[in-house]
Image: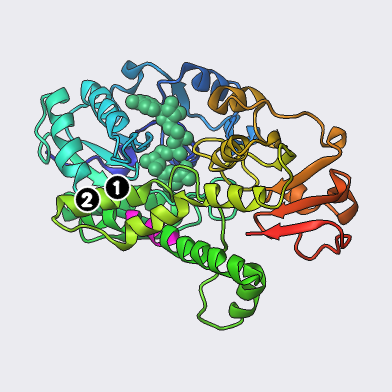
Amino acid sequence: MSLPDLEEISVAVIGLGYVGLPLAVSLSTRFPVVGFDLDTDRVAELSVGVDRTGEVPAAGLEGCGVRWTSRADDMRGVNVFIIAVPTPVDAENQPDLSAVLAACRTVGGVLSEGAVVIVESTVHPGVTEQVCGPELAQASGLACGDGFFLGYSPERVNPGDHEHTVDKITKVVAGQTPEVAQFLAELYGAITNGNVFVARDIRTAEAAKIIENAQRDINIAFINEMAMIFEKMGVSTHDVLAAAATKWNFLDFQPGLVGGHCIGIDPYYLAHAARLAGHDPAIVLAGRQINDGMAGFAAERISSRLPESARVLVLGLTFKENVSDLRNSKVAELIASLSALGHAVEVHDSRADRAEALEMYGIELTGDLADCREFDAVVGAVAHDEYRNLGVDEVMALIKPAGLCADLKGIWRHHALPPEVGYWQL
Ligand SMILES: NC(=O)c1ccc[n+]([C@@H]2O[C@H](COP(=O)([O-])OP(=O)(O)OC[C@H]3O[C@@H](n4cnc5c(N)ncnc54)[C@H](O)[C@@H]3O)[C@@H](O)[C@H]2O)c1
């Protein structure tokens, strides 16, 4: 069975989230595209030009030609399937491949002979060929590598980053044979101006993706550990980093809470794969342990500077700056820890959806920052631009005259706060 010709390609993208949606829109500039998602609300919104994740503007959705659907049958006849569904961890921090397996079963049900199935979800080495391949074969009745072909192409998009978009970055591709790899190179090359890197094989590409994020996690963990040490020494971590960063090969990482669904998750996939291979990972899990402990550490240090039952205002709840994504936010842990220490915490986030915050964390976001006054402490937890740009007077307006300014991201460290104000930075 031969691979589809480039001119005959039609694509289905399965999973229209942060990864799948921009990809579907980008591919639609060159190929007919069906965008499939189980979430009927998401499909309905996309159909009227609304992307609640803010990754694709209405202008990008309007007239892009993608056929949005929740009906698997609408993918029949398509010859390239791209799976971009979530790969979280379970309560024991073990890989949860249930969405990937469900997507494989859906694809298997509509797979036709000669089609190519590409996994874009982040998975550990071996998953595409040893888990997805058999699942697809069973659901379709076709033989993997003969009736259909497997490819893998990891995704590098960075939510909120409108510079490194899918069409501007190098796309790593791999196939179960050199011919399939070449097919992927041409497919993705059509939307990246040929900017593709062909990895040796699928396992290599899977491994490359997973270490990109694990490497970030470990580097941040190192800086977080330094922050704990410098805190004890009474030295500003941010000032140390500003000085050290003047060396040409010093790596620029900042301390902070590591949430979201990539950097804090993918190392657990790597750890799982390491154990399967017979190696007990030391550094990978040590990094995770430090980063997972940062919310508790910050809460304890802030609380030690507060009176009992203090009123605390936390600015920011999303998992990182300038995005609306609340999933796996470590700020929620910080808030829970501060509350458990007896403080009354109010939370403001200019970007988060109020209903989602309530549903996900039981947190009722306060409305207008202008109404937030006389707190014992303000905690700058997420560096949204609008918090970063608060002037001294605006920060002071939030707290009592001798209140505490807890600056997790070091965004106000150059403010000349009155001497009676306490200042703490991570
Ligand atoms: N978000 C990122 O920054 C990023 C970056 C690189 C890689 N990744 C990886 O890409 C993958 C997708 O992540 P995301 O952030 O786009 O997730 P997401 O949660 O934003 O979107 C996933 C979408 O898949 C849909 N879905 C779930 N199960 C499905 C199924 N069986 N069939 C069809 N649709 C289904 C959901 O409804 C959702 O709309 C994950 O493996 C993630 O690790 C994410």
Task: Give yes or no for contact between labels 1 and 2 (Cβ–Cβ under 8 Å).
Answer: yes
Q: Which residue is mark 1?
A: 269
| Quarter holding ligand 1 | top left
**How far is the residue under mark 1 from the one under mark 2?**
6 Å
Is residue 184 one of those drawn in magenta? no
Left or right side of 299 for 125: left
Helix, strand or loop at label 2? It is helix
- Which residue is more in the foreground, 217 or 124? 217
Which amino acid type corresponds to the residue marked 1 in the rendered image? Tyr
Name which residue lies at 62% across and 69% down: 237
Q: Is mark 2 within 8 Å of ligand 1?
A: no
Q: Is residue 73 above or below residue 151?
A: above
- In the image, is residue 214 part of the stretch drawn in magenta? yes
Left or right, 378 with respect to 409, comes to right
Q: Which residue is mark 2?
A: 273
Q: Position of residue 421 (x, y in %)?
A: 83, 56
Residue 380 in the image, given as x and y percentages of width and height: 70, 49
Vertical arrangement, residue 101 with respect to residue 7, above or below: above
| Chain part drawn in magenta | 210-216
Give residue 216's quadrant in the image.
bottom left
Q: Amino acid at mark 2?
A: Ala
Q: Residues within 10 Å of mark 1 (few under 14, many from 20)?
A: many
In the picture as drawn, the residue positioned furthest to the bottom comes out as: 247
